[in-house]
């Protein structure tokens, strides 16, 4: 733990993280007071099952925001991959070992297309990924308009079962964030994302392959989206073109709450993880408190404003 | 620097490339119309044209507002959510009497202006990025709206609201007339007035604008208010067209309005673009949608083509910045 | 003769319609500082980019350490030991000094993963070898500009640097910082590193350079050891004509002493940089405001114009305080402010020449709320002619014009509305010698027409050549004032390096 604190202090992120951690603590205390079913293994198992999809798409979004971009095609892509997996496995349930890697490659590949278009057409990623979102969504709809298909029961096991009392999804989520965190902080390629996001021109002059790094960031976002889609299809059992759409904007909130700034170059996955926890636990708490899901939207909007308010002291704004 | 400067001057002169950049959209639109006329004789029929434009009118209003937000280096993601919220507001009067309509308009404009003020305040005074600020307002409006309606559609509207979509004055559809008035007002404001000049100044270089005696904060807030008000008015006209208030009236308009503006040459980096260009962008967008239908493609194809067009158009204008 | 570390022969670079480099030959031997001179657009940047691998030439050969090479990208040149320090520093403001220094030589620890501790240790060693004390774990955006530049130089020492190229490093620093930079450069030179040095400041060339090469319009004008050259010979080579009189004649002394000052600043404190400043500017007078970068000069101008707050003291224009302190009010009172950052805070690059000229005074070309485009165009054409701005039309985008012409547009903008006081911050920065002469003439003419002018400049010859009186600042305070024949580079420097408080207010009053 002290090592983590030291790393954080070195990166001068401690004060910001402290605010999020403090908020988390407040929410958990409040939750415990509101309902005795809140702070239970059962509820937190449920929370992690709920959180894994949001966590993975937010992780993906962290990469694109770190390099100063954004990916607005996440939702459409997630839907498309659920449709692919459910349709394919409906046809050949025995070919899981084909369907899963292909789904991942599809995600990474479409992400790479996002990055490539943005880099080579020199168009802002907002526009590119928005356009790609339309293309992916349209193509998916042309194949399947309504939810359908099916997946083998083993998917459901992964989504809902526990291993040593802890949901498998929790292991998956923590592992994904840990790998991403070490990669970003402790490898040369990972650091390059910070260089590109911090100052693209400086990165270029320092010999960083800016274009390749950008394409990589979008490919990673697509890859994370495909993982999220696999958990989605495991939970629902069907492929649904529309199921991912809300994820596009939802994926941004935890990243911002976690202190990664839209301008790029600052932040990281640990913050995003805290952001995912905060958003998920808050929604969970609001459910316990009997607040309608509609008001949860309002709360989410306020969280964005408050989060940006916290990080606003940043030189480059939120 | 000199070598670059000379090249730049040449580029901006009367080269073919320059001409194309200026008139590319019109050429593209003409091409679309020719393709449409050849492949489907029904397209250029007056009835179809009026239909196409009538559908486009509310989007056109939103795009006019969106243009102001983009011109000051921003964008407004809250427009669609505001349209639906304004529509819900219209039903809140629970009136079936047409005399309430002016009141509905006044209330809608006041609500919109307040939302615009909130956006503008967050962006200009609090330094929140436009993307996040308007995203937050969008979600908040959505939550408030659903909490009010409980998620159910409502159809208690004054019958006169339908006139907004189908009525005609001197043979001109009311909504097109309204769009025209709004466009002329916005055009004069932007291209002829001092405020318009200040908007371009703030969009091009906010710091220099401040040093030249303009208040970037006030101008930015004004632009978001204009964006919201245009969206609010557009919401009422769309409501007239749809007839029933679902909680999702106008869904997709936030992105469509940005797409249309960008296609019309409004630069996301701010300070560049015109009302006429943005409206041409709207026309191109709806003509494409219409063409997809007329050519008998599946309706989902619209999405795909829209996506390709937006990337292509943006690449055409070479916008590198947000 | 030592074998050159770098030898360029007949390098050519051709773009459609222009030839930024036309058969230029250039060489650097180890252990020399080779100055590269030329007006803006002469081809210096293109040449450094060719050396550094950012631009591939169309013709000619590059020989590096005796071997013919062809860089495919900056990385290759870098790995071979060529380090370019660009005008815009290639640093990451969000990251630490250590990470910036070791940007592409990140040390690895266990498991092949990067080690922050090792990074900091190595950075510390490099900084020490340069003799600089900067905290390796500080973030770049916390450092002063001069320290940032040192970080950039430290970066060069990570690999085995053979050739160091500095593109106008002194444009953003001055005084002690320049001395420190030169000191480090001599240190590197003594280690056998070849250095290419680009600067507009001729004084520095004599100070640091061993050899000088001059480019003009992409062609080689000549190359010679610095001892064989004089200042006027260098200018002559750069502009291709003899400039006998750079600065126009000064005003005859004290003709208007009877009148009260136009601008009267008393005991001004503003923000962190301005602690105690008092100064007067009279009508028809050019007052130079000198001092090191960071001494608070620009911040004084900001406070006068209403950008920075007045924390203490007073600012009076024509004997009355400026109420409602902000730019729009200052403009209304007849103050103009030409900022040092032409592109960042001066011009609207995407807008037309006409729109730029009338930006602070839209009401002059408006009828009611509407802008009268015809009148604006007509008046703009008059201004363009009066300031001899070279532009095809007044609706041309300002971004398409050269630096000198952009600066003239700013002059035409501010002199139109400034009928009392004109503040100039680095009025000739990034402007070539030819345009400089014209700008000096314009400034003097404005003063002769009765305008009060406050001119901030880092170039001492400019301050000496233009000012009727010079106020010198150090550490946010006025340390001295010189006038008339007493204005020399030495006398200004004397006050600029003075510790504050030593030159008391009384002394300053006596001088005035």
Image (cartoon, rainbow, N blue to C red):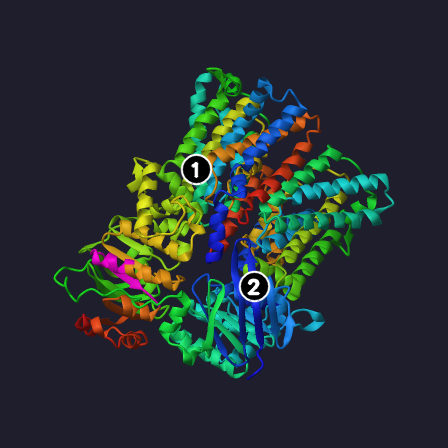
Q: Please state which of residues B202 and A22 is positioned toward the viewer in this rendering.
A: B202
Residue A11: quadrant of the picture: bottom right
> Percent position (x, y) of residue B92?
50, 26
Q: Is residue C445 magenta?
A: yes
Task: Tell me: residue A224, above or below residue C9.
Answer: above
Q: Is residue C223 magenta?
A: no
Q: Tell me, yes or no, whether dots 2 and 1 are on the same chain.
A: no
Q: Residue at x 58, y 18 (%)?
A: B47
Depth-wise, is mark 2 or mark 1 nearer the camera?
2
Find the distance from the CA under tag 2 to the CA under tag 1.
55 Å
Disc 1 designates what residue? B225
Q: Which residues are magenta?
A: C442-458
Disc 2 designates what residue? C12
In which quadrant will I find the C terminus of chain C?
A: bottom left
Q: Please state which of residues A218 and B32 is positioned toward the viewer in this rendering.
A: B32
Residue B151 visible in rendering: no
> Percent position (x, y) of residue B266?
50, 40
Residue B183: quadrant of the picture: top left
Left or right: residue B101 versus residue C7 is left
Q: Chain of mark 2?
A: C
Query: Element type at marker 2?
Result: strand
Q: Please state which of residues B232 and A34 is positioned toward the viewer in this rendering.
A: B232
Task: Tell me: residue A130, above or below residue B302.
Answer: below
Query: Element type at marker 1?
Result: helix
> Percent position (x, y) of residue B8?
48, 50
């Amino acid at each position: 733990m002290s090592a983590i604190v030291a790393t954080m202090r070195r990166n001068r992120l401690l004060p910001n993280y402290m605010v999020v951690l403090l908020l988390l603590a407040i929410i958990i205390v409040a939750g415990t007071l509101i309902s005795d079913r809140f702070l239970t293994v059962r509820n937190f198992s449920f929370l992690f099952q709920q959180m894994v999809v949001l966590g993975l798409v937010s992780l993906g979004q962290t990469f694109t925001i770190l390099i100063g971009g954004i990916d607005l095609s996440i939702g459409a892509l997630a839907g498309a991959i659920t449709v692919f997996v459910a349709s394919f496995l409906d046809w050949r349930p025995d070919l899981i070992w084909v369907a899963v890697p292909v789904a991942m490659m599809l995600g990474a590949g479409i992400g790479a297309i996002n990055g490539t278009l943005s880099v080579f057409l020199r168009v802002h990623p907002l526009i590119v990924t928005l356009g790609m979102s339309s293309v992916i969504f349209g193509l998916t709809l042309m194949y399947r308009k309504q939810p359908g298909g099916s997946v083998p029961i083993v998917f459901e096991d992964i989504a809902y079962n526990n291993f040593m009392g802890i949901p498998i999804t929790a292991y998956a989520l923590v592992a994904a964030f840990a790998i991403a965190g070490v990669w970003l902080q402790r490898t040369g390629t990972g650091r390059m994302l910070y260089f590109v996001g911090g100052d693209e021109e400086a990165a270029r002059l320092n010999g960083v392959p800016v274009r390749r790094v950008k394409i990589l960031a979008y490919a990673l976002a697509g890859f994370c989206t495909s993982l999220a889609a696999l958990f989605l299809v495991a939970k629902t059992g069907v492929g649904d073109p529309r199921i991912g759409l809300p994820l596009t904007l939802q994926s941004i909130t935890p990243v911002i709450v976690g202190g990664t700034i839209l301008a790029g170059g600052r932040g990281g996955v640990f913050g995003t993880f805290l952001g995912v926890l905060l958003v998920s636990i808050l929604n969970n708490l609001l459910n316990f408190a009997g607040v309608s899901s509609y008001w949860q939207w309002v709360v989410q909007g306020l969280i964005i404003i408050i989060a940006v308010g916290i990080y606003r002291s940043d030189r480059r704004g939120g | 620097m000199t070598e670059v400067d000379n090249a730049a001057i040449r580029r901006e002169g009367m080269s073919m490339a320059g001409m194309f950049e200026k008139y590319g959209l019109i050429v593209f639109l003409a091409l679309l119309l020719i393709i449409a006329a050849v492949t489907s004789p029904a397209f250029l029929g007056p009835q179809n044209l009026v239909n196409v434009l009538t559908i486009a009118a509310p989007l056109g209003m939103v795009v006019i507002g969106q243009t102001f937000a983009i011109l000051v280096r921003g964008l407004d993601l809250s427009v669609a959510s505001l349209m639906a919220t304004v529509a819900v507001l219209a039903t809140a009067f629970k009136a079936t009497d047409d005399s309430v309509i002016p009141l509905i308009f006044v209330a809608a404009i006041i609500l919109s202006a307040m939302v615009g003020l909130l956006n503008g305040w967050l962006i200009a005074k609090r330094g929140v990025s436009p993307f996040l600020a308007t995203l937050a307002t969008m979600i908040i409006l959505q939550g408030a709206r659903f909490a009010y309606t409980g998620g159910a559609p409502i159809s208690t509207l004054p019958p006169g609201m339908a006139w907004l979509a189908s009525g005609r004055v001197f043979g001109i559809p009311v909504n097109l007339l309204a769009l025209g008035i709004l466009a002329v007002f916005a055009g004069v404001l932007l291209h002829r007035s001092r405020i318009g000049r200040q908007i371009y100044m703030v969009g091009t270089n906010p710091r220099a604008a401040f040093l030249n005696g303009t208040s970037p904060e006030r101008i930015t807030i004004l632009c978001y208010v204009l964006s919201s008000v245009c969206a609010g008015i557009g919401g009422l006209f769309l409501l007239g067209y749809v007839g029933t208030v679902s909680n999702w009236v106008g869904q997709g308009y936030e992105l469509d309005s940005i797409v249309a503006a960008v296609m019309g040459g409004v630069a996301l980096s701010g300070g560049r673009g015109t009302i006429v260009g943005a409206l041409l962008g709207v026309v191109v967008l709806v003509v494409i949608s219409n063409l997809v239908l007329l050519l008998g493609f599946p309706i989902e194809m619209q999405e795909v083509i829209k996506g390709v067009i937006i990337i292509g158009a943006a690449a055409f204008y070479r916008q590198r910045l947000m | 003769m030592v074998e050159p570390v770098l030898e360029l022969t007949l390098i050519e670079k051709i773009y459609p319609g222009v030839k930024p480099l036309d058969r230029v030959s250039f060489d650097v031997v180890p252990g020399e500082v080779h100055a590269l001179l030329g007006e803006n657009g002469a081809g210096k940047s293109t040449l450094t980019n060719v050396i550094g691998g950012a631009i591939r030439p169309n013709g000619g050969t590059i020989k590096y350490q005796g071997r013919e090479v062809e860089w495919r990208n900056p990385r290759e040149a870098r790995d071979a030991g060529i380090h370019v320090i660009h005008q815009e520093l290639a640093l990451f403001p969000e990251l630490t000094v250590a990470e910036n220094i070791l940007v592409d030589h990140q040390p690895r620890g266990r498991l092949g993963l990067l080690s922050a501790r090792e990074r900091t240790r190595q950075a510390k060693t490099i900084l020490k070898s340069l003799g600089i004390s900067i905290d390796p774990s500080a973030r770049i955006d916390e450092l002063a500009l001069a320290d940032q530049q040192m970080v950039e130089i430290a970066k060069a020492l990570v690999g085995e640097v053979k050739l160091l190229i500095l593109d106008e490093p002194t444009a953003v620093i001055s005084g002690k910082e320049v001395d420190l930079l030169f000191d480090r450069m001599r240190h590197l030179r003594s280690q056998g590193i070849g250095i290419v040095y680009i600067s507009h400041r001729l004084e520095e060339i004599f100070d640091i350079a061993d050899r000088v090469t001059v480019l003009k319009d992409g062609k080689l004008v000549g190359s010679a050891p610095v001892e064989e050259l004089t200042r006027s010979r260098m200018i002559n080579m750069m502009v291709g004509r003899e400039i006998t009189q750079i600065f126009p004649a000064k005003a005859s002394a004290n003709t208007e002493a009877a009148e009260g000052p136009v601008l009267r600043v008393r005991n001004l404190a503003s923000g962190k940089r301005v602690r105690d400043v008092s100064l007067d500017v009279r009508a028809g007078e050019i007052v130079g405001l000198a001092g090191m970068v960071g001494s608070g000069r620009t911040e004084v101008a900001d406070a006068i114009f209403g950008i920075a707050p007045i924390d203490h003291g007073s600012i009076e224009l024509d004997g009355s305080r400026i109420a409602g302190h902000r730019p729009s009010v200052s403009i209304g009172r007849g103050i103009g402010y030409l900022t040092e950052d032409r592109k960042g805070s001066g011009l609207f690059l995407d807008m037309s020449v006409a729109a730029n000229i009338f930006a602070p005074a839209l009401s002059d070309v408006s009828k009611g709320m509407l802008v009268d485009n015809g009148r604006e165009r007509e008046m703009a054409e008059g201004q363009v002619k009066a300031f001899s701005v070279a532009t095809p039309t007044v609706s041309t985008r300002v971004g398409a014009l050269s630096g000198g012409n952009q600066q003239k547009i700013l002059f035409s903008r501010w002199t139109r509305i400034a009928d009392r006081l004109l503040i100039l911050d680095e009025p000739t920065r990034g402007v070539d010698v030819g345009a400089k002469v014209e700008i000096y003439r314009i400034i003097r003419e404005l003063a002769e027409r009765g305008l009060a002018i406050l001119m901030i400049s880092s170039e001492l010859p400019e301050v000496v050549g233009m000012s009727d009186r010079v106020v010198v600042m150090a550490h946010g305070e006025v340390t001295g004032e010189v006038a008339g024949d007493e204005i020399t580079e030495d006398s200004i420097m004397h006050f600029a390096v003075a510790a504050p408080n030593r030159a008391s207010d009384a002394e300053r009053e006596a001088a005035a």
